[in-house]
Image: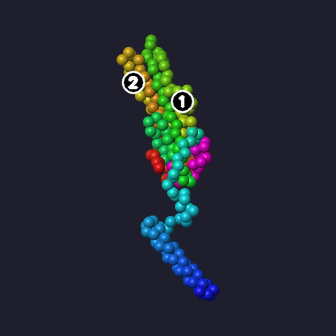
Amino acid sequence: MGFDEKVDVIDLIINVLRDHEKTLDDLIARLEEALTGGAPLPPAEGRAAARRPTVTAVLRRWSEFRERCAGASLVAFDVEGRRFRVSAVKDGVLYSYQEEMPEMEIRFREKEERTVVEAIDLGGVEQVPAVLRGRLECGLEVSVKGVEFKLPDGGAVYKAIYDIDADKARSWLSDQLKIEKETILQGELQI
């Protein structure tokens, strides 16, 4: 086979490969359209942010969570048990933050027309600021409801139950993370 014939064969191979490349591009475009119901997919580099998170980062400081999750695409919050939890998806990472809700129990009894406090239980020294301020360490305001129980010995227990208002929490998170309220869910994000 001469040199000119070899060049012609290489030319033919290149043309066939170009045709196959065009056919593959068309097939990929049709597949993407079928998968998205007609809505075009973002470019490949934009799709990386839409991927399912593969790692979870549990942060202990609210300031770090706030910094890393500013502008997150999705945020969820809830109170489960005695824990306030927030999670957010940003740049392919599921971030989470949690802190304990405060609690307070006061034991008292009536004695000679006076109320005598016998004990105050705050659940731990780290809870004192939250109990007194009415805010969690992260800064979210908590609401307080009280329940009083009478004891058989004539005393009583007042239990302060701390909770969060979902609408206030959503507004507060929107402000803290610089995102729209509509991207904030009450619930939990999981991988």
Determine which of the numbered discs, if any, sits on residue 149 in the image: 2
Q: Residue at x 41, y 25 (%)?
A: 148
Q: Residue at x 51, y 77 (%)?
A: 20
Q: Which residues are magenta?
A: 63-75
| Horizontal and vertical percent position of residue 35 | 44, 66
| Horizontal and vertical percent position of residue 119 | 48, 19
Give the farthest residue toward the front: 1
| SS class, disc 2 | strand
The amino acid marked with disc number 2 is Phe
Q: Is residue 81 magenta?
A: no
The residue nearer to you, when weighing 59 against 101, is 59
| Horizontal and vertical percent position of residue 154 | 38, 16
The residue nearer to you, when weighing 184 against 25, is 25
The residue nearer to you, when weighing 163 against 63, is 63
Q: Earlier in the sequence, mark 1 or mark 2?
A: 1
Q: Residue at x 39, y 24 (%)?
A: 149
Q: Give the Cα distance between marks 1 and 2.
A: 22 Å
Please tell me whether residue 91 is drawn above or below residue 157 in the rendered image: below
Determine which of the numbered discs, if any, sits on residue 164 in the image: none
| SS class, disc 1 | helix
Please tell me whether residue 126 is drawn above or below residue 77 in the rendered image: above
* Residue position marked by numbered label 1 in the rendering: 127
Q: Is residue 68 magenta?
A: yes
Give the farthest residue toward the top: 112
Judge whether residue 132 can be spotted in this image: no
* Disc 2: CA contacts within 10 A as few (<14), some (14-19) or many (>=20): few
* Disc 1: CA contacts within 10 A as few (<14), some (14-19) or many (>=20): some
The residue nearer to you, when weighing 37 against 149, is 37
Q: Residue at x 49, y 53 (%)?
A: 182
Judge whether residue 63 can be spotted in this image: yes
Which numbered disc, 1 or 2, marks the residue closer to the eye? 1
The amino acid marked with disc number 1 is Gln
